[in-house]
Amino acid sequence: CSRRGVDPEAVLAEVRAATASAGPGPVDGPLPDLIQHILGHYHETHRAEVPRLLEMATRVETVHGDKPECPQGLAAHLARMGEELEMHMQKEEQVLFPMILAGRGAKAGMPISVMEEEHQDHGKNLERLRQLAHDFVPPECACNTWRALYLGLDELEQDLMDHIHLENNV
């Protein structure tokens, strides 16, 4: 948030306001509910979306690689990003979340600091993703796959930023 000039407290207030209309939610509920929300919404979504977007990025680079507007290197970056994200989620699922659920959250300082450092790396990866994909604005010559790719990347960026914010600040 600070790198983008956004007040984290304001973002949290917006998240809480948006979820308040739906009644009590994971942000306001007990930690097990929050963890289940992270697993069920964010982790499942990332695991489904990254491979789908990677397939589209590969197709766009293969078909349109001769065009100057083509996002060269996007598929490779997305593949690396997906691998790093998967390793990060596994650490949360196998180490951090079980510690918290077992009531050992006070001893989770080291895993939490590692996760926060990785969140910073994910933020840098998102910046590079946006750069490679020309701010997710497709050129006029873009086919439907290219347009869908950029739309999906924009959604992935927002979802991952929301995920990171939730874990870092709530």
Image (cartoon, rainbow, N blue to C red):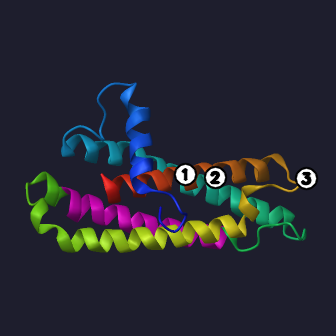
Residue depicted at x 45% and y 56%: 7
From mark 2 to mark 3, how far is it between C-alphas? 18 Å
Measured in 3D between alpha carbons, the distance from the residue under mark 3 to the one under mark 1, in whole angstroms, is: 24 Å
Looking at marks 2 and 3 on the same chain, the residue that comes earlier in the sequence is marked by 3
Residue 26 spot, x, y in % from top left: 29, 38
Relative placement, left or right, of 145 versus 5 is right
Mark 2 lies on residue: 154
**SS state under label 2:** helix
- Name the residue rendered at 37%, 67% in the picture: 88
Residue under pointer 3:
140
Amino acid type at mark 1: Gln
Q: Residue at x 18, y 70 (%)?
A: 109
Instruction: In the rendered view, tell whether residue 134 sits above or below residue 152.
Output: below
Label 3 or label 1, whichever lies nearer to me, is 1
The disc labelled 3 sits on which kind of residue? Glu
Is there CB contact under 8 Å for labels 3 and 1?
no
On screen, residue 53 above or below 3: above
Q: Which residue is mark 1?
A: 158
Tell me whether circle 1 and circle 2 mark residues in contact (CB < 8 Å).
yes
Rendered location of residue 12, percent (x, y): 39, 47
Magenta span: 75-97
Q: Main secondary structure of the magenta part?
A: helix
- Of residues 148 and 111, the one drawn nearer to the viewer in this rendering: 111
Amino acid at pointer 2 = Asp
| Residue 115 in picture, x, y percent from top left | 32, 69
